[in-house]
Image: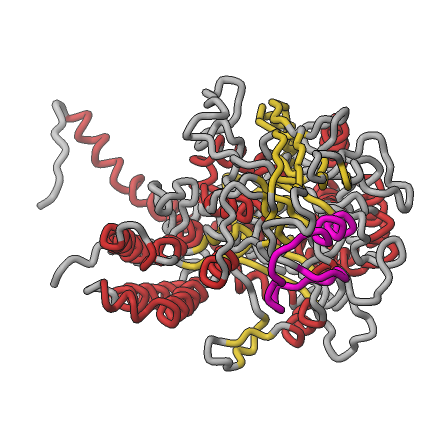
Amino acid sequence: MSLQFIAPDRDHMVRRELRKPLLFFGLVTSVVSLCVGILLGRYALCSEENPQTNVGKNGTFLPGIPDAIITDGDPGITERLMKEINNKNIEEFLEHITLKPHVAGSENSLDLAKWMKSKWQEWGFDDVTLTPYDVLLSFPDANAPNVVRVLDATGSVVYESPLKEANLTGEDHPDALPPYNAYSPAGLIQGDMVYVNYGRVEDYNWLKNNTSIDVTDKIVIAKYGRIFRGSLVQIAADHGASGVIIYSDPKDYTLSGAAVYPDSSYLPPTGAQRGTVYEDIGDPLTPGYPATKSAYRYSEDSPKVKLPQIPVHPIGYGIAEKILAVMGGPEVPPEWRGGINITYRLGPELKSPGWKVQIHISTSNVMKPVHNVVGTIKGAIEPDRYVLIGNHRDAWVYGATDPGSGTAVMMEAARVMGNVVKSGIWRPRRSIMFCSWAAEEYALTGSNEWAEEYRKALRERAVAYINLDTVVTGNYSLSVSSTPLMYHAVYEAAKKVPNPNHTDTEHPTLYDNWLMKKEWRDGDGNHLNIPRIGSLGSASDYATLVQLTGIASVDLGIEPDYTASSVVFFPLYHTIYETFYSVKRFVDPDFEYHRAVSQMAAELTRSLADSLIIPFNVSDYSWALNTYRQTLDREHGAKLRDNLDNYNELKDVISNFTRESQRFNERLSTLNRFDPMATRAVNDQLLLLEKAFLDDEGLPDRTTRKHLIVAESSKNAYAGSTFPGLVDLLFEIDAAPDVDARWERVKQHFSVLLFTIQSAASTLSDVSRFMPGVQ
């Protein structure tokens, strides 16, 4: 059918006829011009230096969109970061950080926050904020410090503990608080005392099954180690104890016959480990919500506020010797003996009739403002995607190792990355946030309140979190704990860091040394030819970000060889002797190991922030889920099969997750990386996966722990647990008051777990076909 013009008169008909050759000529001219323009654009305007971004594109492109949007990160930045991170700077930062005690809520801690803010601004950060929260903290009475006494039958004092640790190398700063356990209730209690080893559930079970000793209304004395001190106190309260004394035994914190601080890094008799005994996370009075000015606060005696219920006090082994030496009762079993040169006895009576132990606790809870510092380097392409790197700032006293080593390491990484951006040489694809958290030592408080306040944005936009807390406790090997999505990125970063042990020429990188020292083996002992990575508990700020916002997280450090001795952790932990002197003299004199951690943290941050495709490997998650299932099966499989008709479905849903992981990787291998919308879609799937394991209801009886695959053990907050809800419910299930009711809870949670893994698998499916349906 031909189109016809309808003209009202002849003149119009003539003009219409004249238009035909003109239209044809114009059409030909336009086509020729278009072809010339394309040729000019290809050969005259396009740079030959980067041909791959201009040839063979098959995607969505718009005028004015830069090639950077489809370009991978510049690998040359890695070498620059490695070279510019300076161990001397780290040493100077640590010396400055440890000049004064800086417990949370103090002026000294706020001064450090302001110092960090000014440094980050100086180094070219795009934005730095000081974020306050009003939280409940806990302090001893400086005029009436906590004390432990031994009383004779008349009530006279036979022995009274010193009120503070001895000044061995100038540690007697007026701002240094004496030893105490935060959130312990105040009180004066006295009575008989029972020795309970490490105060674990199995220790109380041993007493119950092998003795007639009852700890009800008695003081218990326990060794530090093996479990979180807050768990120790809660277990004691659950068994009816009236109070707790925790001491650091020389068997766990020294070597027999070895010198102690100030002549070595081993714990002296006067050293006492401070620390919180609050088991939950975040400000106690605002559970679930940020402690802002307008927040509703529960009273301390509210059922919603789970503060410790019995007094507790920490002491060194010099004081413990005086107390344990007067204990009566039967001898402890051989495996309960410590390293003090006494006969360890169970109690509860003391050797002399009528003698008692007394604890006087003056600690009180106080509302205080605390401040996070968050500095942002804005991303050039995806500013709405955040890679977080963080470390807490507060310390019980000087905190040279915890957290000073991590703070100094983070500051040097911030200096180098900020200056590279400031110079115009580089800007990351995604935004990088450096985070200095407040009041971590109390209850991971600063990071928790921040995560509660911004959880909606973080769940949508946060990519990953790198935690730098107690990063250098020795010089043996890299030590890493992580969620599975981070494995690949961690391994690749470690391969780029030079081995800080310059005498070890056979292992040129940090990765090589790590693999040699800590190769991963499966449950059957088979070599996996990769370094071992642990599970995350709740010992530091990563816990709040994993549990509340589902951010893939990693915790980095270099530690001593704990398998070579009985020492359980770095001996000066949380004592007044954790000083700059102790780090410089005994741990890392040249700060080479600190430098290595800073290099690794910077490179890991760079790769996560700058790679075109986020360097997560979803297959690592399927492998981890299978490993977790096998562990669950070994430990609880027989019991679960006897009580759950659908127990085998766990294997099925993990197999389905594995298939979806494989399909995702196949699509990723053929992805058109010149299509910015396609790469964005894939990155969103990678970002969403960790968050898909969250459940808003939380774990059974632990609503603040929302990650159903990894969380800390409910019986030891330091230890990571996999399938934690199931493991919690299965713990001593046969001794539950109502076994059938407990099994019903297991069945319900197991159903939620199956759904959650299936739901997570769907996030990896083709984005337009994530509902398989029934065939």
- Work out whether residue 432 or residue 319 is closer to the camera in this orientation and state it: 319
The residue closer to the viewer here, 241 or 37, is 241
- The total of numbered circles placed on residues is 0
The percent coordinates of residue 490 (x first, y second) are 58, 61
Taking the spot 51% from the left edge, 80% from the top edge, the residue there is: 525
Image coordinates for residue 216, horizontal then vertical, percent:
49, 44
Query: Where's the C terminus, which quadrant?
Result: bottom left
Asked where in the image residue 394 lies, by quadrant, the reply is: top right
Asked whether 354 or 763 is in front, the reply is 354
- Residue segment shown in magenta: 316-344
> In the displayed structure, does residue 15 sit left or right of residue 761?
left
Residue beneath the point at 60% across and 61% down: 330
Residue 690 in sight here: yes
Residue 365 part of the magenta-drawn span: no
Q: Quadrant of residue 376?
A: top right
Is 433 in front, or is 441? 441
In reply to whether residue 331 is colored magenta, the answer given is yes
Magenta part, dominant SS: loop
Q: Residue at x 19, y 64 (%)?
A: 645
Residue 711: percent from the left, percent from the top?
Answer: 46, 52
